[in-house]
Amino acid sequence: MHISEGVLSAPVLIGSGVLAVGGTIIGLRRIEQENVMPAALLSAAFFVASLVHVPIGPASVHLVLTGLLGLVLGWGCFPAILVGLFLQAVFFQFGGLTVLGANTVTMATPAVFCHYLVRRWMEQPGTRMPAAFAAGFLAILFSALLTAAVLDFSNEGFAAAAKMLIIANMPIMVIEGCVTMFTVAFIAKVQPEILQVKTAS
């Protein structure tokens, strides 16, 4: 749900930029050397999944797989998402460079939250699928709420668009939950070590 350039106020741009830098620094410090490749693969998956988007006012809706990134990478999803968003802004003009920090925060923060919320349930096969669905669903829900809050905070005129963004993302939440669940099920069968990626404290 990329926020377009020219719609956010300067304080929001600066504040979100600082938060994005902080989250990225933490993420880079917590990704261990042997886990760089899974992080790169998930960043590529995020890049591809979110290329197809539907514009909704000053933002857009699309699959992002941030729930999956959060489950596997934890704080490492900050640099992974930042790289994907940067490449999309440069090559396809999705979002933009000035709102790179805001878009990173609205997508990566919910992913980290979902990591801590449901990660422990991923260890048991019986609860792995519900946990994966919850991560995908909640990551989009919280991203939509956070994006709506950012838009409303920047300009009260975006209140209607912010509400529309949340409503438009409701079916995406369910789809994202299902995609995350089936992806986790597939990975658990063919390469389960990816689900065991650990990040440094």
Image: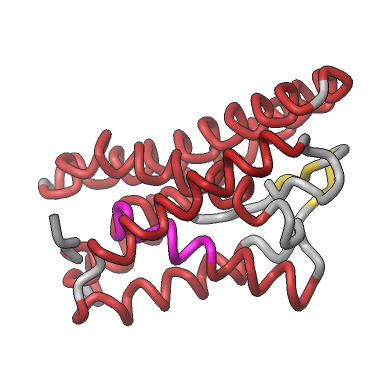
**Is residue 196 left or right of 136 when viewed as pictured?**
left
Is residue 22 among the parts visible in the rendering? yes
Q: Between residue 189 and residue 6, name the one nearer to us.
A: 6
User: How far from the left and from the top, in percent, is residue 46?
Assistant: 54, 65
Task: Residue at 72% x, 62% y: name it.
Answer: 97
**Is residue 161 left or right of 66 when viewed as pictured?**
right
How many numbered circles are shown?
0
Task: Residue at 70% x, 66% y: name it.
Answer: 51
Q: Name the image colouring.
A: secondary structure
User: How far from the left and from the top, in percent, is residue 168?
Assistant: 74, 33
Position of 20 relative to 164 (above/below): below
Q: Between residue 11 and residue 47, name the one nearer to us.
A: 11
Judge whether residue 7 is colored magenta. no
Task: Residue at 11% x, 46% y: name it.
Answer: 124
Is residue 182 among the parts visible in the rendering? no
Which of the 4 image quarters holds residue 59?
A: top right
Task: Residue at 59% x, 69% y: name it.
Answer: 47
**Is residue 101 left or right of 92 when viewed as pictured?**
left
Position of 175 relative to 50 (above/below): above
Position of 143 relative to 199 (above/below): above
Judge whether residue 81 is colored magenta. yes
Q: Between residue 136 and residue 153, name the one nearer to us.
A: 153
Quadrant holding the C terminus: bottom left
* Magenta span: chief secondary structure: helix
User: How far from the left and from the top, in percent, is residue 9?
Assistant: 77, 35
Magenta segment: 73-82
User: How far from the left and from the top, in percent, is residue 196?
Assistant: 16, 63
